[in-house]
Image (cartoon, rainbow, N blue to C red):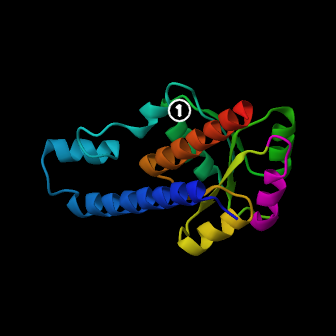
Amino acid sequence: MFGLEQLLARALRWRFLRQGRQARQERQGRQGQGGEPQRAAAASGRPPGRLDPGQAAAAEPVTLLAILRTAAERATLEQIAAPSGWTLHLTDSYEQARALLAAAAIPLVVVDRDLPGADWRQLVPALAGLPHAPCILLASAVADEYLWLEISRHGGHDILPKPFEREAVTRVVTFAWAWRRSTLAGGAAG
């Protein structure tokens, strides 16, 4: 089962996901009603004066493998990752992902919930069972507590909501990266 620390960390992540969703809905409701600062904030995807979460991860770049079904989703993730300085590996098949993971230990992996020819319920435990098991994020248009519990039960870490939006992707990936680094540091220390 999960330790109290893991449950608290996951609860905080869900709170941040909900806050992000609420902020996005508020921004969509205000579009076209404000002046120049509001238009600039809407264009950047965050309220004026708010720090870009990607800047927090700038000290050590994120390394990420994404197994995504569509070229459009891969392109969107690539656009989000580029300004953050992340090292991003993109593929559309589990076989290519296995080859990449065999060649290099990649600490974060995004698995598409709707990957053709593969069931994520089988992919996630297979990835979690690798010698250098990555932190696994499930990319899904459905992001509820039931799916989160199911991904956790199968060895995954969190849900990356689709369609991809810069703020949500940056927040989820940054938290996962911090968690992965802390587990690596904890394993090296003990």
Location of residue 111 in the rendering, given as x and y in whole percent from the top left corner = 69, 55
Give the quarter of the figure containing the C terminus.
top right
Residue at screen point 55% across, 66% down: 141
Let me know if residue 148 is in the magenta part: no
Q: For residue 4, which quarter of the picture? A: bottom right
Residue 94 position, x and y percent, is 81, 52
Question: Which residue is nearer to you in this view: 172 or 169?
Answer: 172
Query: Foreground residue, 171 or 14?
Result: 14
Q: Is residue 130 left or right of residue 170?
A: right
- Specify the quadrant that holds the N terminus: bottom right
Q: Residue furthest bottom?
A: 146
Residue 13, above or below 144: above
* Residue 68 appears in the picture as rendered: no
Q: Position of residue 34 (x, y in %)?
A: 14, 52
Extent of the magenta region: 117-132
Q: Residue furthest top?
A: 59
Where does residue 99 sit, x and y in percent of width and height?
A: 86, 41
Q: Residue at x 73, y 31 (%)?
A: 188
- Which residue is identified by label 1? 82
Q: Residue placed at 80% from the left, 45% from the top?
A: 97
Three-letter code for the amino acid on which mark 1 is drawn: Ala
Residue 184 as seen in the image, left or right of residue 17? right
Q: Quadrant of residue 91?
A: top right
The reply to whether residue 135 is in sight is yes
Vertical placement of residue 66 versus 119, above or below: above
